[in-house]
Amino acid sequence: MAEKKRGSDERRVNQSLRELLDDLLELVRDLSNNAADMPSAELEYAQQRLEWLADEIWRAAIKAESE
């Protein structure tokens, strides 16, 4: 039970990580719905954005873990 509470508290405390995860989910949902109709340049940009978000999420998670 305490572990579940910690996860809930962490979402409130680590707002930047939560926002990054929300951005990632929004982008993935958009891609899953529209990728077939997107021009290649837009898909390439989306791939770069996914990679950037993954890096930022990793950094935020590691930072939160070390605090």
Image (spheres, rainbow, N blue to C red):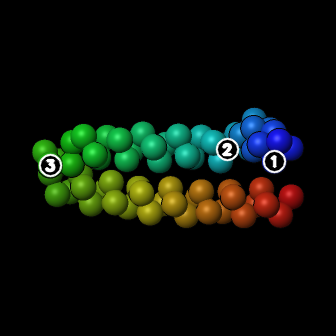
Q: Quadrant of residue 6?
A: top right
Dot 3: few (<14), some (14–19), or many (≥20) neighbours within 10 Å?
few
Q: Relative to 64, say whether 1 is above or below.
A: above
Q: CA distance from mark 2 to mark 1?
A: 21 Å
Q: Percent x, y for residue 66? A: 83, 64
Q: Is residue 61 left or right of residue 44?
A: right
Look at the image and tell me in which quarter the C terminus lies: bottom right
Is residue 10 visible in the rendered structure shown here?
Answer: no
Q: Percent x, y for residue 4? A: 77, 42
Sequence-wise, the earlier of marks 1 and 3 is 1
Is residue 54 visible in the rendered structure shown here?
Answer: yes
Give the SS element for disc 3: helix
The circle drawn on residue 3 is: 1
Residue at horizontal 14%, vertical 49%? 36
Question: Which amino acid type is shown beneath numbered disc 3?
Answer: Ala
Sequence-wise, the earlier of marks 2 and 3 is 2
Dot 1: few (<14), some (14–19), or many (≥20) neighbours within 10 Å?
few
Give the SS element for disc 1: helix
Q: What residue is pinned by disc 3?
A: 36
